[in-house]
Image (spheres, grey):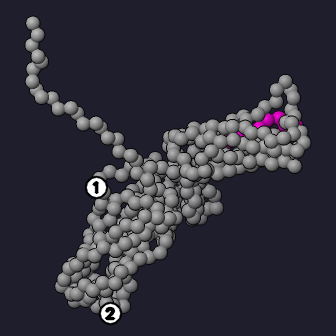
C-alpha cells in the first residue's frame, strides 16, 4: 500500500509574495525504490478567445522544481513507513488572483512526483488559491446618476432621474445600503426599486501589453476578444410609491453574494470585475425594469499606511548658555 499527499500549512488563500509552506506525506508499507521525490510549483494563465479556433492560449506565471528527497551513497530505497518532507516556496509578487470563469482561468498548483526506475511514477497534485488586496483610492462612497427620458415601452411618460449611492469597496457576504434618489418628472408612478449583482470577464486571445479599461475600448478585433457576464446571487427589490412630479430618497438593503470571492483585477490577458444593476419599475408600464450598471469593487482593501503626526515646533530659540 502506498499513499502520497500534499498538506499546506494554510488552507486559506495566499497573497502575491507570500511563502507557501507545508509538507509532502508519503506512506509505503514496503520499501520503495526511487530516484528522487520532486515538487513542482506552477502558475498558469489560460484563455480561449478565438471564435474560429480550437486552440487555447496558455502562459506560465511561474514554474519551479524543488527536490524533496534524493538517494544518498547510491541507496535508492525509501524504507517502509510514513515519511514527511517539508517544503517552502515564495510566490512571485505579480501573481493575479485565482480564477475559473467560462473559457479563462488563473490556476496555481503543486505537483509531487516519486520517480521510480522501470515503474510508473507516483504523482499527486494539489491546487491552492491566490488572491489580492484592492488598492482603491478616493472616498468611501460613490454616487452615480442617470436620466431616463423614455420610461414606458409604448408610451413616453416623461423623464425620470435615478441617483444611486453605494460603498466604494465591499466584502463577500456583506449587507450594504443602496441609497436611491428618484426625481420623477414623468406622469407615471414609480412603484418598485430593484438591484442585482453580476460578475464579468473580458479576455483576449493573446496577452496585451496593458489591460483594457473596458471591453468596448479593446483594440483587438471581435474575433480576438470575449466578454462574459452572469448574475451572482439573488435580485433584491423594494416596493415604493413615488408619485408623478415628485422626488424621494429610499435606502434598500442589498446582500453581496458570498460567492464573490475573487477580487477585481486586470492584466494584459484578462479583466475580471463586478457590476451592480440598479433601476426601477413604473406602475402600469409594459416595459421591464429601467436600469443602468454601476461598477463595484469586491475584496479586501490594503491597509492604509498612516504617517505619525509631526511634532509642532514652537519656534522659540534655544535656551542661552554662557
Q: Is residue 200 left or right of residue 4?
A: left
- Closer to the camera, 57 or 5? 5
| Residue shown at 63% from the left, 58% from the top | 55
| Residue shown at 40% from the left, 51% from the top | 301
Query: Callout 1: helix, strand or loop?
Result: loop
**Is 47 part of what is drawn in magenta?**
no
- Determine the image quadrant of residue 42: top right
Which quadrant: the C terminus?
top left
- Determine the image quadrant of residue 65: top right
Per the image, the residue denoted by label 2 is 284
Mark on residue 139? 1
Does any portion of residue 171 appear in the rendered image?
Answer: yes
**Is 33 part of what is drawn in magenta?**
yes
Decide: is 206 above or below 279: above
| Residue shown at 71% from the left, 49% from the top | 125
Circles 1 and 2: CB atoms closer than 8 Å: no
**What residue span does the magenta drawing correspond to?**
32-40
Camera-side mark, 1 or 2? 1
- Determine the image quadrant of residue 241: bottom left
Point out residue 60 in the picture as x, y percentages from the top left corner. Answer: 60, 45
Point out residue 310 in the picture as x, y percentages from the top left corner. Answer: 22, 33
Decide: is 157 above or below 66: below
Disc 1: CA contacts within 10 A as few (<14), some (14-19) or many (>=20):
few
Q: Is residue 176 left or right of residue 205?
A: left
The dominant secondary structure in magenta is: strand
Amino acid at each position: 500500500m502506498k499513499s502520497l499527499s500534499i498538506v499546506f500549512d494554510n488552507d486559506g488563500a495566499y497573497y502575491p509574495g507570500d511563502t507557501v509552506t507545508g509538507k509532502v506525506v508519503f506512506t509505503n508499507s514496503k520499501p520503495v525504490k526511487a530516484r528522487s521525490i520532486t515538487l513542482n510549483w506552477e502558475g498558469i494563465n489560460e484563455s480561449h478567445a478565438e471564435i474560429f479556433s480550437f486552440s487555447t492560449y496558455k502562459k506560465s506565471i511561474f514554474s519551479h522544481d524543488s527536490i524533496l528527497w534524493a538517494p544518498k551513497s547510491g541507496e535508492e530505497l525509501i524504507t517502509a513507513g510514513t515519511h514527511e518532507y517539508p517544503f517552502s516556496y515564495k510566490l512571485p509578487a505579480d501573481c493575479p488572483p485565482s480564477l475559473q470563469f467560462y473559457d479563462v482561468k488563473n490556476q496555481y498548483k503543486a505537483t509531487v512526483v516519486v520517480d521510480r526506475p522501470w515503474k510508473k511514477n507516483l504523482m499527486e497534485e494539489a491546487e491552492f488559491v491566490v488572491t489580492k488586496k484592492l488598492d482603491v483610492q478616493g472616498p468611501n462612497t460613490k454616487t452615480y446618476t442617470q436620466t431616463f427620458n423614455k420610461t414606458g415601452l409604448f408610451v413616453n411618460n416623461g423623464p425620470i432621474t435615478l441617483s444611486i449611492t453605494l460603498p466604494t469597496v465591499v466584502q463577500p457576504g456583506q449587507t450594504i445600503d443602496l441609497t436611491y434618489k428618484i426625481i420623477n418628472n414623468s406622469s407615471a408612478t414609480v412603484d418598485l426599486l430593484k438591484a442585482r449583482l453580476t460578475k464579468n470577464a473580458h479576455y483576449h486571445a493573446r496577452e496585451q501589453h496593458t489591460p483594457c479599461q473596458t471591453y468596448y475600448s479593446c483594440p483587438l478585433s471581435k474575433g480576438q476578444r470575449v466578454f462574459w457576464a452572469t448574475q451572482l446571487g439573488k435580485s433584491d427589490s423594494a416596493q415604493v410609491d413615488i408619485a408623478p412630479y415628485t422626488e424621494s430618497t429610499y435606502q434598500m438593503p442589498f446582500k453581496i453574494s458570498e460567492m464573490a470571492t475573487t477580487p477585481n483585477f486586470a492584466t494584459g490577458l484578462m479583466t475580471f470585475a463586478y457590476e451592480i444593476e440598479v433601476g426601477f419599475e413604473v406602475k402600469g408600464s409594459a416595459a421591464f425594469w429601467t436600469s443602468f450598471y454601476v461598477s463595484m469593487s469586491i475584496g479586501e482593501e490594503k491597509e492604509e499606511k498612516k504617517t505619525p503626526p509631526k511634532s509642532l515646533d514652537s519656534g522659540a530659540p534655544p535656551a542661552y548658555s554662557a
